[in-house]
Image (tube, helix red, strand yellow):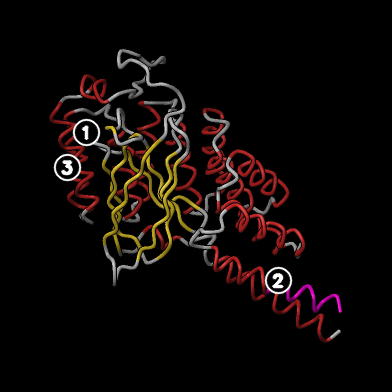
Amino acid sequence: MHELFNARRRLALILPCLALFLFPGLVWAQLGGGSIAGQVRVNPGTELPNPVLISLESRGTIIKTVYTDGEGRFGFNGLPGNIYHIKIDDDAYFPASETMLIDPETSPVRMVNIFLNPRKPEKSESRVATGGNPHLTSLAELKTLFPPAAIKEFDAGVKADAHHNPDDAIKHYEMALKIAPDFYPTRNNLGTTYLNKGSYAAAEEQFRNAIRLNSNDAAAYFNLGNLHYLTRQYEEGLNWVNQGLNKEPSSAFGHFLKGSLVSAAGDSQQAEKELQRSLELDPKLAKAHLALVNLYLRQKRTTEAVDELQAFLKILPNDPLAPKVREVLSKLQGSSAKASQ
């Protein structure tokens, strides 16, 4: 009986440790730190034909999202020391992900190159999108839809973000919008810059404007869902994520974000379904595996937690979090063995 009590105490101690790298607090959007500067190209190295949305994720949620500029460049700044996942989930390409370790003291700026593999053969740039709102399908169309001066300011904003100058980035983005108020990728980037500064109201305004200008862009809905997750407005966040999933029902990240929101709201059963669905869509979504582990541990479902950790290691043996996962797995297996004695 004494051993069983000790085993349960150890299990209870494991949960907070695991939760440390699954669910961040509000402070994450406000802290300063390192930077990531990146370039996106299409395999085998050709220029990216159209802007794509880049998501920066850590501890189970999106920290920031930005669009690439006209040359496929992007940047994130103000990052506390941690492991980050840079993800691209665009209908035109297979999902891509890169993992970066940020240590502001030893490596304040990290560079990354991402190569995308198209889902289908490239179509002519004369292709036009349906719907009443602009949907950027090519760099040529981007230059046709918006004035060169606006694109120049947008690019300058992206560069300022990459160099950890959010105030300069805001100035450039605002100038781009003064020239072209309907330039919705700029509104998304401006919103994420505000979010990084902790200006939630300003960020929300820009994300809402992005949706107004392009209501078919699921990413904008997910951005708002994530914003409300960070501000603990789970019901409102769930509303936005559901709208995003209506636009893009096969989004693994969308289902993961929904699972995170309903879990935070206390609906563990629905959270489990959403997290499992996200893994059906993308088995390599590391944060979904870990969120399920966290959920199972809260419910004292040790066997399922062990199975999920083993699945993580089988699919992602070289993930930066793999050593931590092995450590937690070893503790859980040791606790289970002692409890059965």
Question: Where residue 156 is drawn, which disc sits there?
Answer: 3
Disc 3 from disc 1: Cα separation? 13 Å
Of the image marks 3 and 1, the number of the one nearer the N terminus: 3
Which callout, 2 or 3, points to the residue nearer the camera? 2
- Taken as a whole, is the magenta stretch helix, strand or loop? helix
Q: Please determine whether, in this image, residue 161 is positioned above or below residue 302.
A: above
**Quadrant of the image for the N terminus?**
bottom right
Q: Which residue is mark 2?
A: 332
Real-space CA distance between mark 2 and mark 3, rounded to the nearest whole angstrom? 50 Å
SS for callout 2: helix
Q: Secondary structure at mark 3?
A: helix
Q: Nearer the viewer, residue 145 or 170?
A: 145
Q: Give the class, few, some or many, for how many residues have Cα within 10 Å of label 1's Cα (few <14, many ≥20).
A: many
* Image quadrant in which you'd find residue 310: bottom right
Task: For mark 1, give the secondary structure.
Answer: helix
Amino acid at the residue labelled 3: Ala
Q: Is residue 280 above or below residue 269?
A: above
The label shown at residue 177 is 1
Residue 288 part of the magenta-drawn span: no
Which one is earlier in the sequence, the residue at label 2 or at label 3?
3
Is 317 or 217 nearer to us in this picture?
A: 317
For mark 3, does the 10 Å Cα neighbourhood hold few (<14), some (14 to 19), or many (20 or more) residues?
many
Magenta region: 331-341
